[in-house]
């Protein structure tokens, strides 16, 4: 086997993707890049989008921080919230969200603003917005009801409504520079992250499936640890594979899933929120299952290094084994 640097495209958003990136960046043979959902409508990001007319900065910022040279110090400074001052519209936002939004306003180009932030933080990989066109996530539930907005879609399924389908309104297209970057990835990793609002919206952007068709290496799904509320009762990793494959029109080659669980007391806390361990389900024959103990603490979060080593094990065997 001959070692070489591999370029990875990591797709997602929320808190799951930064955790993955933070582990991968420690491997000198991996060059991790993020392709980030851009349809956040809640919290500071949604407010800045509405008030300043900028793209939501939150997920981009978190991924850049995860890839930064000094992540702990950068997070301490840029995730601190400004105090709420009388008559000040910008109070309550994180310094990093404001910084990225102001860079976008003054540069006139969101990709230039992200590159400026990367240079400031000394990021090892790149962070790409899947699109620079504004849109909202919309959902139709099993009872026929409709909703619009990331926060509202999450709230609907968490309260017990099964998501029948989701779409973006208005339809948006992938940025040409991002499509070109995807074509140069050796492999693609999807997740972990909120399935309907962090993962699936990326693959609804026009041109993403075409870009993924040019990737020669494997498509790897990191399955979530838990389902996400009553509307996902019984949902499995196999269900996630089916929906992703339908969206991208190509196979998911590998699913990395957790196979060991914390104490009943810890699981009981999540059961109160109607969240249960995500089972593998009946995966298609072409999809390899890679299991391991990734939940090592009391909070439902993948262990960074364990997940990063699992990804390296898959990639080294599939991409370097015959080299």
Image (tube, grey):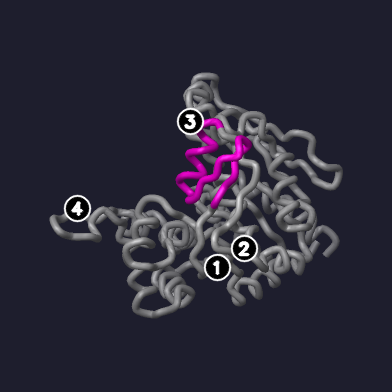
Q: Identify residue for label 3.
A: 298
Image-based side of 30 in relation to 275, left or right: right
Q: Is residue 118 visible?
A: yes
Considering the image in quadrants, where does the N terminus appear?
bottom right
Q: Are marks 1 and 3 in contact (CB under 8 Å)?
A: no
Q: Nearer the viewer, residue 139 or 98?
A: 139
Q: Which mark is residue 84?
A: 4
Residue range corresponding to the magenta coloring:
138-160
Q: CA distance from mark 4 to mark 1?
A: 32 Å
Q: Which mark is residue 131?
A: 1
Q: Is residue 5 visible?
A: no
Q: Are marks 1 and 2 in contact (CB under 8 Å)?
A: yes
Find numbered disc 1 in the image and state the secondary structure of the residue it sits on: loop
Residue depth check, mark 4 versus mark 2: number of the one nearer the observer: 2
Q: Nearer the viewer, residue 320 or 108?
A: 108
Residue depth check, mark 1 versus mark 3: number of the one nearer the observer: 1
Find numbered disc 4 in the image and state the secondary structure of the residue it sits on: loop
Q: Nearer the viewer, residue 253 or 171?
A: 171
Q: Residue at x 51, y 38 (%)?
A: 156
Please report whichever mark, 4 or 1, sits nearer to the chain's N-terminal start. Answer: 4
Find numbered disc 2 in the image and state the secondary structure of the residue it sits on: loop
Image-based side of 133 in relation to 279, left or right: left
Image-based side of 4 in relation to 49, left or right: right
Tell me if residue 144 is in the magenta stretch. Answer: yes
Please report whichever mark, 1 or 2, sits nearer to the chain's N-terminal start. Answer: 1
Q: Relative to 238, is 189 above or below? A: below
Q: Identify residue for label 2.
A: 205
Q: Position of residue 49 (x, y in %)?
A: 38, 62
Please report whichever mark, 3 or 4, sits nearer to the chain's N-terminal start. Answer: 4
Q: Residues within 10 Å of mark 1 (few under 14, many from 20)?
A: many
Q: Relative to 163, is 148 above or below? A: below
């Amino acid at each position: 086997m001959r070692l070489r640097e591999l370029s990875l495209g990591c797709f997602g958003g929320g808190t799951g993707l930064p955790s993955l990136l933070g582990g991968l960046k420690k491997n000198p043979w991996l060059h991790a890049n993020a392709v980030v959902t851009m349809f956040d409508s809640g919290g500071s990001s949604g407010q800045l989008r509405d008030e300043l007319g900028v793209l939501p900065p939150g997920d981009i910022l978190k991924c850049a921080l995860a890839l930064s040279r000094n992540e702990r110090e950068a997070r301490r400074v840029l995730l601190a919230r400004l105090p709420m001052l009388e008559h000040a519209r910008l109070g309550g936002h994180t310094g990093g969200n404001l910084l990225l939004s102001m860079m976008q306003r003054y540069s006139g180009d969101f990709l230039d603003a992200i590159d400026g932030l990367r240079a400031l933080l000394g990021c090892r990989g790149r962070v790409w917005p899947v699109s620079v066109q504004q849109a909202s996530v919309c959902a139709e539930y099993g009872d026929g009801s409709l909703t619009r907005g990331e926060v509202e879609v999450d709230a609907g399924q968490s309260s017990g409504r099964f998501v029948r389908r989701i779409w973006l309104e208005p339809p948006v297209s992938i940025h040409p520079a991002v499509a070109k970057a995807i074509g140069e990835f050796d492999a693609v990793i999807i997740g972990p992250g909120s399935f309907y609002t962090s993962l699936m919206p990326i693959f609804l952007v026009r041109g993403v499936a075409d870009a993924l068709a040019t990737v020669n290496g494997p498509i790897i799904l990191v399955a979530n640890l838990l389902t996400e509320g009553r509307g996902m009762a019984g949902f499995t990793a196999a269900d996630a594979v089916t929906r992703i494959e339908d969206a991208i029109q190509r196979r998911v080659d590998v699913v990395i899933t957790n196979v060991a669980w914390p104490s009943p007391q810890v699981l009981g806390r999540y059961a109160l929120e109607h969240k249960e361990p995500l089972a593998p389900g009946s995966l298609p024959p072409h999809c390899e299952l890679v299991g391991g103990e990734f939940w090592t603490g009391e909070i439902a979060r993948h262990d960074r290094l364990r997940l990063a080593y699992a990804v390296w094990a898959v990639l080294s065997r599939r991409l370097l084994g015959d080299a």
